[in-house]
Image (cartoon, helix red, strand yellow):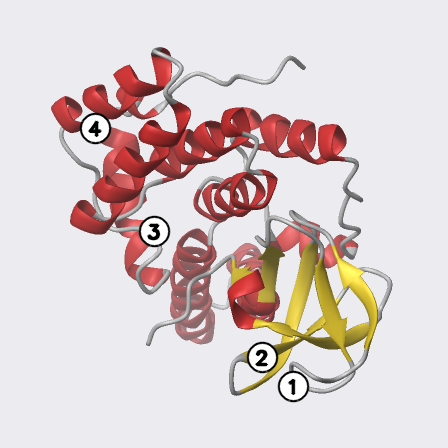
Amino acid sequence: MTPQLSPKSRRLGIGIALLTAIVALALAGIARADTGNTTFDEANRLFSEGRYADAAVAYETLARKHGWSAPLLYDLGNAYAQEGNVGRSVLNYERAHVLAPRDPDIVANLAHVRATAGLPIPVRPWYQSLAQLFTPTTWTLFAVLTLWLAGAGLVATRRWRSRRLAYAMALAALVGVMSVAAMVVLDRDLNHAVVVESKSAPVRVSPFDTAASETTVSEGQDVSIIGHHGDFLRVRDGQGRTGWVQSTAVQPVVPRQS
């Protein structure tokens, strides 16, 4: 699939905008509402003129003023990709993927940037891939609706004792439990982060600038944040190696509230 590196935010329909706004409420500040087309058009014009650094600044400014959306993050990832900023390109594609996990353009561009930069493809367990089929908000809606139906069905079966109703109640309960499990998996994935350092960042044995460095992590590489101390974060890479890096070298995919 040929990567789509043109602005997407201008194509955002009202329905998707409303869905994005709903998703935003559950993601603690990653996304909120969409912005007007006029401001997007200005940023998109800079992109179309090949002024990718200026376009990235414009998209970032829009985000600070009005909040994130999946198309805006996608466009920001495109701008950084064209600028050659691998780390922030991967970071913003990953953030867009959280909000729109089944968007083929986001998936294709993320894979393309990683392949071009020679980055390893993150290997995730099957249950994590399954959980990422939908957004946290969608799983929450599934859980609330199906567990409510299961509870209502339980009350109804005690009164009418219908076998079909009992089967439907059991199915609703099963979907509800699966939805809750998916939410737990996604919650545990909040430590997912991307290396944004323009050069390889040293991974130290302890959280001090003077500590020895046994390995490095590359720009755009996926890591997990497993601890913090002062200006350092303890991370684990895809091979299970752990160590300490400067907090400025790594950005979490789901931004943490201060």
Which of the pair 230/98 is nearer the observer?
Answer: 230
Residue at 31% x, 26% y is 9
State which tag comes first along the sequence, 1 or 4.
4
Using the numbered discs, state the Cα–Cα distance from disc 1 to disc 4 in whole angstroms: 49 Å
Q: Tag 4's secondary structure?
A: helix
Give the residue number, with chain letter if any, for mark 3: 23
Q: Residue 211, image x and y in percent?
A: 74, 84
Badge 3, how many Cα within 10 Å: few under 14, some, many 20+?
A: many
- Disc 3 marks which amino acid? Val
Badge 2, how many Cα within 10 Å: few under 14, some, many 20+?
A: many
The quarter of the picture where the N terminus appears is top right
Give the residue number, with chain letter if any, for mark 4: 14
Using the numbered discs, state the Cα–Cα distance from disc 2 to disc 3 in whole angstroms: 31 Å
- Disc 1 marks which amino acid? Phe
**Res. 133 visible in picture:** yes
Q: Tag 2's secondary structure?
A: strand
- Disc 2 marks which amino acid? Phe
Q: Residue 100, image x and y in percent?
A: 46, 39
